[in-house]
Image (tube, rainbow, N blue to C red):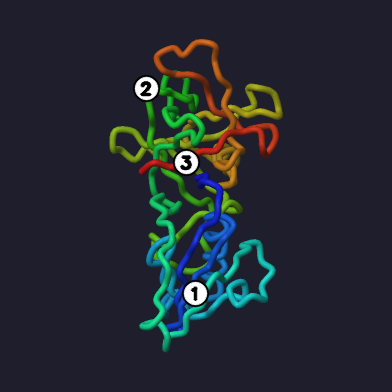
Amino acid sequence: MSFPPGTFYVYVEHNRDQYLVAFTSRSAADELWRVIQTTNDMENNTRRHSSQHWSVSLLPHEIQGSGTGPAGCFVVQRILADSLDNIGFPVIPHNHQPDNISGNSYFIRSTIRNNLYWFWNQKSNRIELSSTHQTKFLIKRKTPLPFGCLTHQDILIGTDAVHLFPVQDDVDESRFRMITRIGRLGEAKKILFVETQRAESYKNGAFWFRLFDGGFGVQYSSEASGGRVGFVHVATRSDGGERWEFVP
């Protein structure tokens, strides 16, 4: 899922000290959460209470100011436990968008034209873009994380490979079908199709999660027949697609 650009703030608690941390984006914050998951004992005092409130048993180097990892951040304010009662924390902008949790189902909507959704056309088995039809999709990581974590803390980041499954009429169609890419527009552009699960479909159905931030493009048609205005494909260039958001 593509998040709106801009600074993203997180409260981080460590040994009763509290940090107000500013990230370059929410995606950068989620990347640092993955670092925390790999270095912390997730059964101890490390918890993701929300996307903007974390408790950690081991403070990552990035917040200590000595890290050079991909999740660039800046500690805006640190308040020691002894001074919390007297100082308190400033109010930060609240983000209402849900976490990108592996195994959850969402509608997929354009961030540019928010009346257009991904739609599984079962007649053609293509993934189309529609203003009148929409399909919910199960987003699930291809490979399990190498450490244990609670389901609601299994947050997807751009470097994760995921599989996409259409879900219809409250029935889990993921047992039978999944989205794959087929080179109908030439080798560079590959249309998204829905196919029965098999070994080959698993190979062609693995997508980098970062594609939702501009890697999926749309081939618009000249006529918006029945509200369907085009079909979705993998863009030729990384910046050749649109940005997409998840709607629960």
Tell me where residue 186 sits by quadrant. top right
Residue tagged by mark 2? 132
Q: Residue at x 41, y 79 (%)?
A: 87
Residue tagged by mark 1? 19
Tell me where residue 184 sits by quadrant. top right
Q: Cα distance, mark 2 to mark 1?
A: 45 Å
Residue 211, labelled with which disc?
Answer: none
**Three-letter code, disc 3:** Glu
Tag 3–tag 1 contact (CB < 8 Å): no
Q: Residue at x 57, y 49 (%)?
A: 161
In the rendering, at what x and y percent does residue 237 appear?
70, 35
Q: Nearer the viewer, residue 182 or 75?
A: 75
Of the image marks 2 and 1, the number of the one nearer the N terminus:
1
Of the image marks 3 and 1, the number of the one nearer the N terminus:
1
Q: Please tell me whether residue 162 is drawn above or below residue 180 in the rendered image.
A: below
Q: Nearer the viewer, residue 159 or 141?
A: 159
Tag 3–tag 2 contact (CB < 8 Å): no
Image quadrant containing the C terminus: top left
- Crowding near the residue tagged with mark 1, few <14, some 14–19, many ≥20 C-alpha atoms within 10 Å: many
Residue 121 shows in this picture: yes
Of the image marks 3 and 2, the number of the one nearer the N terminus:
2
Circle nearer the viewer, 2 or 1: 1
Residue tagged by mark 3? 245
Q: Residue at x 61, y 33 (%)?
A: 241
Q: Please tell me whether residue 190 is drawn above or below residue 210 in the rendered image.
A: above
Q: Please tell me whether residue 35 is drawn above or below residue 183 in the rendered image.
A: below
Q: Nearer the viewer, residue 188 or 4?
A: 4
**Three-letter code, disc 2:** Thr
Residue 175 shows in this picture: no
